[in-house]
């Protein structure tokens, strides 16, 4: 299983990331993180992010997902998809 910390800093990053992981057809790609109360969450990177993008664009709401810290999220996949998401992976020093 591949797990990587990623950073999505703006809506364009979310769009690019969603497009990239949507290329993975043979297995699920999940985003995991914690909400403002420290509770864990786990969502599909292929469908929920698209909904968030459409919601923000269609409704012009600047804080569609304001309760989520988009800079402390991880992506998990059963196969190595680093080549698809390398632009979003955070390398801790």
Image (cartoon, helix red, strand yellow):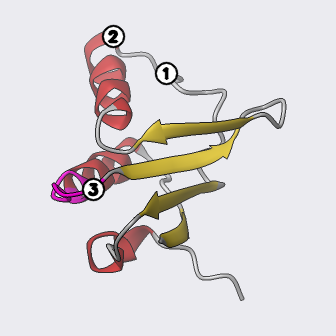
Question: Quick one: quadrant of the C terminus?
Answer: bottom right
- Quarter location, residue 71: bottom right
Instruction: State the image quarter where residue 63 is shown.
Output: top right
Q: Residue 87 location in percent, x, y?
A: 37, 73
> For numbered disc 3, what is the local secondary structure?
loop
Callout 1: SS: loop
Number of other residues with Cα within 10 Å of mark 2, as a class: few under 14, some 14 to 19, many 20 or more: few
Residue 59's mark?
A: 2
Q: Are marks 2 and 3 in contact (CB under 8 Å)?
A: no
Q: Does residue 7 appear to the left or right of 78 in the view shown?
A: right
Indicate which disc residue 27 carries.
3
Q: Name the residue nearer the viewer: 7 or 60.
A: 7
User: Which numbered dot is residue 64?
Assistant: 1
- Side of 37 relative to 10 (left or right): right
Q: What stretch is highlighted in magenta?
A: 20-27
Where is residue 44? Give x, y as percent: 40, 40
Residue 63 colored in magenta in the image: no
Report the residue at 29% width, 42% height from top.
46
Instruction: Confirm or deny contact between disc 2 and disc 1 (CB under 8 A).
Output: yes
């Amino acid at each position: 299983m591949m797990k990587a910390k990623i950073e999505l800093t703006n809506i364009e990053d979310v769009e690019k990331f969603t497009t990239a992981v949507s290329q993975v057809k043979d297995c699920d790609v999940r985003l995991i993180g914690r909400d403002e109360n420290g509770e864990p969450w786990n969502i599909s990177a292929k469908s929920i992010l698209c909904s968030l993008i459409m919601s923000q664009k269609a409704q012009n709401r600047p804080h569609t997902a304001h309760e989520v810290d988009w800079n402390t999220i991880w992506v998990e996949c059963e196969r190595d998809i680093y080549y698809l998401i390398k632009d979003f992976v955070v390398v801790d020093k």
